[in-house]
Amino acid sequence: MAADIAEQPAGYARLLAPDQADAIARVAAAVAARRPRHVVFTARGTSDHAALYGAYLSEIRLGLPAGLASPSVVTVFGARPDFSAALVVAVSQSGGSSDLTEVVRQARDSGALTVAVTNTADSPLAAAAELTVDIAAGHERAVAATKTYTAELLALLMLVEGVRAGDGRLPAAERAALAALPELAAQVLADPAPAQLALRYRFAAQLVTTGRGYAYPTAREAALKLMETSYLPALAFSGADLLHGPLAMADADIPVLALVGSGPGGRSMRELLPRLAERGADLVTVGSAEVDGVPARLAVPQVDERHAPLLDILPLQRLALALALARGENPDAPRGLAKVTSTR
């Protein structure tokens, strides 16, 4: 897991290199030419969180309604939704989930434009889709996905921004901003703070993660990583949903990891933090700036809020790794889990 995490700056550089960027641009141009009316994502596990990020991008950047499909609607209940006006995007590291493949087949049969975003270009999922985006993350050693998750994020970002451009090509300003990501990611991974925080939470019984907008998928992915590597019950909430009841459970015994970026989502999170502080919550923020009254922070560079998920997750992955080791667990082989999970 440590090796996989460390490879992420190189993974960003690989996706941004001309060959990979041009391949994604061709897919984006084909999508733009079809002019879909809405976007449906289908995914499982970690990839589901990348798909949620893609849904935010689609609605905010493209103005297209977007949502996440429930594969069981097709595979368990035998329904046949009409996807004829949709772009259907399946996101899967392995491309081996039979339920996602069946959703893509059914969607394509109903007239949808289908795209597989996967690390396995010769997988059944890629074969079922009309178009494929190779995230080019390379072999992932650990069961817990890290570098494939961030590669999915970047590939989806490049795809959506290419569709927005119309011809698939990223604008010069976007290319310049993304070109800085490999070095910024390396800086974040060099910070010792996550390992230090792991010692603080070694005996925690439960934990909460929270964020809004583009940061909400990061909160969900961080919670999943903590659960599957440290077996620590972790609940992820949108900052807005946290105010609708779950806030009542916050106290000094429940650590709260709050993603507080520099854009609209981060500003809205700053309204929540005083409420958590009032309840004595053990607060840690993840963001580029300090927050008044919150002394603990996992620092990340300031970037566009769309790009922040590519950096914000890195210290949280390292926290999950360090916490698992501190608790005497093996993060490379979580009990009961396999790299490829088959579901219906």
Image (cartoon, rainbow, N blue to C red):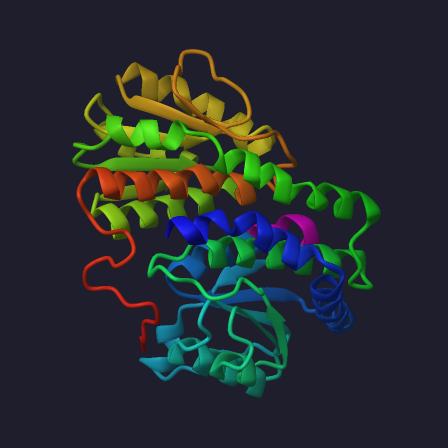
Q: Nearer the viewer, residue 246 or 217?
A: 217
Quadrant in the rendering for residue 23:
bottom right
Camera sees residue 218 = yes
From the top left corner, tell me how far across and down residue 32 is, in percent.
75, 67
From the top left corner, tell me how far across and down residue 242 is, in percent.
35, 34
Q: Is residue 270 magenta?
A: no
Residue furthest out toward the top? 293
Quadrant in the rendering for residue 238:
top left
Q: Image point 35% across, 20% down: which residue?
A: 275
Q: Nearer the viewer, residue 272 or 304?
A: 304
Above or below — where is 264 with respect to 342? above
Q: Image point 34% across, 32% down: which residue?
A: 195
Span highlighted in magenta in the image: 55-64
Above or below — where is 291 with respect to 178? above
Q: Image point 61% across, 52% down: which residue?
A: 12
Above or below — where is 299 with respect to 137? above
Residue furthest out toward the front? 3
Q: Quadrant of the C terminus?
A: bottom left
* Left or right for 281, reference 52: left
* Left or right for 57, reference 41: right
Q: Image point 60% across, 69% down: which residue?
A: 134
From the top left corner, tell me how far across and down residue 6 is, in percent.
48, 47
Above or below — where is 100 with respect to 297? below
Q: Is residue 63 magenta?
A: yes
Camera sees residue 243 = no
Residue furthest out toward the bottom? 109
- Main secondary structure found in the magenta portion: helix
From the top left corner, tell me how far across and down residue 116 is, in percent.
56, 73
Quadrant in the rendering for residue 267:
top right
